[in-house]
Structure formats: C-alpha cells, structure tokens
Amino acid sequence: MIMNLYPYNYYILYVSLFVTAFFLMMTIVKLPTLLKSLNHLSANIETISKHSEGLSETIHKMEEEGKKRKIKLTPQQILELLFLYGAIRKDYKKSPDHTVKQVGKSTTNVLYSRGKQKLIQDELVRIIKNNNFLG
C-alpha cells in the first residue's frame, strides 16, 4: 500500500523553509549581543590569566625560598621538644584509652598545662620586675 501525499509535500517543504528562515533571522538578531558578551568574556579571561601568571611566579619563588631555607634547631629547642614528648607520653600512658584520639587529647592537655605554667611564670617575672626585687 503506497501513500501519496503529493499536495502536502509542498506544504511541508514551505513550513520547513519558513522555520529555517525564522531561526536564521533570530540568530542574526541575537548575534551582536553574543559578540559583546564574548568580548567581555575574553577581557575577563585575559585579566584572570595575568593574575594567574603573577601567582604562579610568586608560588615558584616561595618554593625556591623554602628549598633554600632549612629549619635549624638549637640544642635548647631540641631539649624542650624532648621534655614535651616525655610529658605527652606520660599523660598518654596514664589514660585508660590508648587510641590515636587519645594522643591528640594528651597533647592538648600537656600544651594547655604548659600554657598555664608559662602565664604564671610571666606574671611572676612581671611582679618581680615591678617591685624591683632584682635590684
């Protein structure tokens, strides 16, 4: 069974040409705004690329300085760190829970108590200096 749509073939062709022409005209009408937005976008991209080049240079310089500079510990600092490690280990051994979380808690406890001791020592030094006990 063959269907013959002869009179409607031209109508379908005309409608498809009309739709194509309509979308072509809409594209041409919207093209200037698209070009404006592309120009603004390209300017923004250039600005971002300039800033990123500056940032990459800064990062490169910082990496070079980090390689050149090494941490030098004095014997006094090493001794203080060993005492701190001993205090943390002692607090850790006293606790009933032996987990990684407890290491953090022990470190916090020791540093908190050391901070209080430091504040007390600073206050005593200030009182002694203000009252001229040392001369």
Image (cartoon, rainbow, N blue to C red):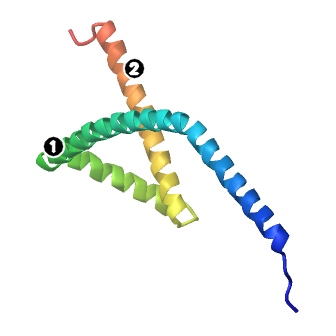
Give, as a three-letter code, the residue at label 2: Glu
133 and 31: which one is in front? Answer: 31
**Of callouts 2 and 1, which one flags the residue occurring earlier in the amino acid sequence?**
1
101 sits left or right of 115 in the view: right
Secondary element at tag 1: helix
Q: CA distance from mark 2 to mark 1?
A: 39 Å
Residue at screen point 74% across, 58% down: 14
Disc 2 target residue: 123
Looking at the image, residue 117 lies above or below residue 88: above
x, y percent for residue 41: 44, 37
Q: Quadrant of the N terminus?
A: bottom right
Q: Which is in the foreground here, disc 2 or disc 1? A: 1
x, y percent for residue 58: 23, 39
71 sits left or right of 117 in the view: left
Give, as a three-letter code, the residue at label 1: Glu
Looking at the image, residue 38 lies above or below residue 24: above
Residue at screen point 46% across, 38% down: 38
The answer to whether any part of residue 72 appears in the image is no
30 sits left or right of 54 in the view: right
Name which quarter of the figure residue 90 lies in.
bottom left
